[in-house]
Amino acid sequence: MFELRYLSNVVTLKLDGDKCIGCGMCAEVCPHAVFALEDKRVKVEDRDACMECGACARNCPAEAISVNAGVGCAAAVISGAVKGGEPTCGCSSDPSNG
């Protein structure tokens, strides 16, 4: 089965480990298993799997997570999967990208 992947090394997701209270809510609501609970704290398990939906940040009671939520790159991942190619969001200045 095809695994949806984000564009490598561009996600805006940030986790402030000092603010994390270990509730695990982010891991529970994340549709792509980006987070894992370890030693009563959350860690980012698979950063590039994040599609920036914002569910984690909206559900974090400690405000330990920030992400610029949007649909541009999520749409790129879906488009790449449908077309059978690499994800592209068209944000590059290279006309061959997207």
Image (cartoon, grey):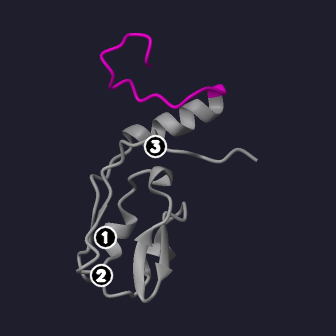
Q: Amino acid at mark 3?
A: Ala
State the SS at label 3: helix
Q: Residues within 10 Å of mark 2 (few under 14, many from 20)?
A: some
Question: What percent of the width, then of the height, locates residue 35?
Answer: 47, 69
* Horizontal and vertical percent position of residue 29: 47, 72
Q: CA distance from mark 1 to mark 2?
A: 14 Å
* Residue pointed to by mark 2: 20
Q: Main secondary structure of the magenta part?
A: loop
User: Could you tell me how far apart the alpha carbons at marks 1 and 3 are, in whole angstroms?
Assistant: 18 Å
In the foreground, 11 or 58 = 11
Of 30 and 41, nearer the camera is 41
Q: Residue at x 38, y 87 (%)?
A: 22
Q: Are marks 1 and 3 in contact (CB under 8 Å)?
A: no
Residue 74 marker: 3
Q: Left or right: where does residue 46 sit relative to residue 18? A: right
* Contact, mark 1 vs mark 2 (Cβ under 8 Å): no
Give the magenta part as a residue range. 83-98
Give yes or no for residue 47 being in the magenta stretch: no
Please state which of residues 96 and 15 is positioned toward the viewer in this rendering: 15
Residue name at image x 33 percent, y 22 percent: 92
Reading the image, the residue beneath label 1 is 58
Name the residue type under label 2: Cys
